[in-house]
Image (tube, rainbow, N blue to C red):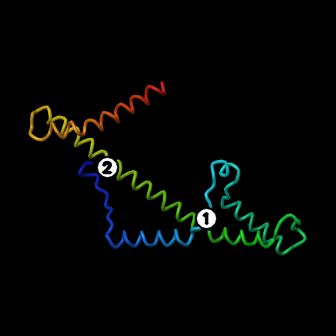
Amino acid sequence: MSKESKLQIAFTEEEIKSLNAHLQAAEDILKGKMIQLTKEDVKKYSKLGKQTVGWAKEVHDDTVNNPFLLPDSVDAKEWARYIALLEVLNPFSLKLSNLAQQLKDTTTRIGFEVVDACHETYHFARFYSTKDKPGFKLVFEKWRTHYKKKMRKSADNATKTM
């Protein structure tokens, strides 16, 4: 992590507690009301985009205004309930997706900076461990085992793809 690449991100203890409390409150409200699709389910069910949601509302409204358009196989009350749920859940889903992506991007960048600092420190210790500087050799040997595992793993993965 170079001294120039500082991210201006910080949280107070109060903010962390508040975020945790609000997330817990959201989890408590949503518990038992949300479902988790399997991979097969995700393939089976189509995702509604903005245009499809608009079209679905249009079709629903037309059947409300013209009940003769509604087939016997469709439960009008259940359909109306689902339309109302979409209107409530879609904005939440969009907000949470955006927040989740921002959190992922932020932790990715912070993680990169942390690992970059580790690499710089490792190489610094490696250099000075060969110069018989006190304290460097022991710590370098300790860190080296992790570094070797990572290097060996990436080398193994590289040869597998050839």
Q: Nearer the viewer, residue 53 or 123?
A: 123
- Report the disc number at residue 9: none
Q: Residues within 10 Å of mark 1 (few under 14, many from 20)?
A: few
Find disc 1 in the rendering and name its residue: 34
Q: Is residue 117 above or below residue 128?
A: below
Q: In the visual, does 6 lie left or right of 154?
A: left
Q: Residue at horizontal 71%, vertical 50%?
A: 44
Q: Residues within 10 Å of mark 2 (few under 14, many from 20)?
A: some
Q: Residue furthest front?
A: 32
Of circles 2 and 1, the one toward us is 1
Q: Is disc 1 placed on a helix, strand or loop? A: loop
Q: Position of residue 106 (x, y in %)?
A: 40, 56
Q: Position of residue 108 (x, y in %)?
A: 40, 51
- Report the disc number at residue 113: 2
Q: In the visual, does 13 lie left or right of 62?
A: left
Q: Residue at horizontal 26%, vertical 46%?
A: 117
Q: Nearer the viewer, residue 87 or 40?
A: 40
Residue 54 in which image quadrant: bottom right
Q: In the visual, does 41 lie left or right of 134?
A: right
